[in-house]
Image (spheres, rainbow, N blue to C red):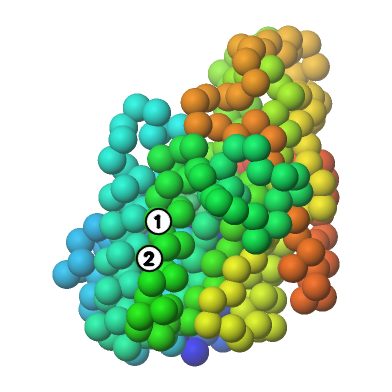
Amino acid sequence: MRTLVTGGAGFIGSHLVDRLVSRGDEVIVVDNLSSGVKEFIQGHIDSGAVDFRLVDMKNLDELKPTLEGVDMVFHLAANPDIRLGTRITDTDLKEGTIATYNLLESMRLAGVEKIAFASSSVVYGENAPMPTPENHGPCLPISLYGASKQGGEGLIGAWVGTFGLQAWVFRFANIIGERGTHGVIFDFIHKLKADPSRLEVLGNGLQEKSYMEVKDCVDAILHVIENTNDSMNLYNLGSNDTCSVRRIAEIVVRETGCHDASIEYTGGDRGWAGDIPKAMLAIDRLKGLGFKVNYDSEEAVAFTARVLIEEIMG
Ligand code: NAD
């Protein structure tokens, strides 16, 4: 099978590439390395298992030829920084919505019929019931990133309805683990590396979200695709519980050995404008397909803290 992974040099994308290569796929990675790290997949490039294309998806003409002969696309490329939208208002539109349009149009022109899309829990917006089921609506995201994910879902739905595409849309919880290059655990470790005596936490620390370990996430993606065959397949991917930011701060302080660090909260119920303070996805649909999540949120946080401390602090 010839698969194309957009954002395949990124955190989640590189783990997906590992799995696709190990199951014997011929893999093409499209990435502009804006937040991706080529070294994550360098071994596969060197072995010839991955054909790496340095392409910016904002450029339709550059993207089109990469789709030739492809059986399935995994679309993970996006701006990963939700907070950026509070300062720069067109990044998510370009890197999310327009890049997704360019991909779908390239797929249509090349006759590629299957896509899996990395969407997000943030499409549900604020005040959704917790845990949030896939059929919750209306979805009213409150961040520019969330709007671009919803835009991507809408475009994919349009391609399914109009051009006969088959799609799997995955709304991810917070995905964490080895090779993480952003997010709360990554930030906390960098802050403690710079100043082991204090840890500043954005918000009051009571924000509470579900965390899913990245290998669980990748396994879940492949499991759902193997076990479903509707024209549009929509699945939440997360773990069975939540973990608070306060608890994450305590775990990172413990795991770094910075026991004297004072944890200081900036206050307010959320880290930044557009942040969703509390989020937990209902994963009954995923479990209904016989999938078992390995890590609960706190285990995933502790495991991630240990591997990222090793990666960042050495
Ligand atoms: P990441 O930043 O590590 O990966 C994104 C990749 O896309 C990077 O390799 C980047 O270089 C590439 N990219 C960005 N813009 C591009 C462009 N214009 N052209 C080509 N490549 C481009 O982030 P990640 O955490 O691995 O996220 C992967 C996907 O999952 C993203 O779509 C993200 O929105 C989604 N997601 C992630 C989480 C999470 O907790 N990490 C949660 C929900 C959804």
- The reply to whether the C-beta atoms of the residues labelled 2 and 1 are less than 8 Å apart is yes
Of 109 and 143, nearer the camera is 143
Query: Residue 195 sits in which quadrant?
Result: top right
Name the residue at 37% across, 75% down. 159
- Which quarter of the image is occupied by the C terminus? top right
Q: Determine the secondary structure under disc 2.
A: helix
Q: Determine the secondary structure under disc 1.
A: helix
**Looking at this rendering, what residue extends furthest in the left direction?**
61
Percent position of residue 215, x then y:
68, 61
Q: Count residues near mark 1 (Cα–Cα under 10 Å), then give few for <14, some for 14-19, many for 20+.
A: many
Name the residue at 80% across, 68% down. 287
Of 132 and 266, nearer the camera is 132
Q: Which amino acid lies under the numbered mark 1 shown in the image of this protein?
A: Gly
Query: Residue 288 sits in which quadrant?
Result: bottom right
Percent position of residue 229, x then y:
61, 86
Label of residue 155 in the image: 2
Side of 291 relative to 97 (left or right): right
Q: Is residue 214 visible to us here?
A: no
Name the residue at 59% across, 74% down. 233
Q: Which residue is mark 1?
A: 151
Cα separation, mark 2 vs mark 1, equals 6 Å
Q: Is residue 180 visible to us here?
A: yes
Tally of marks: 2
Percent position of residue 279, x then y:
69, 41
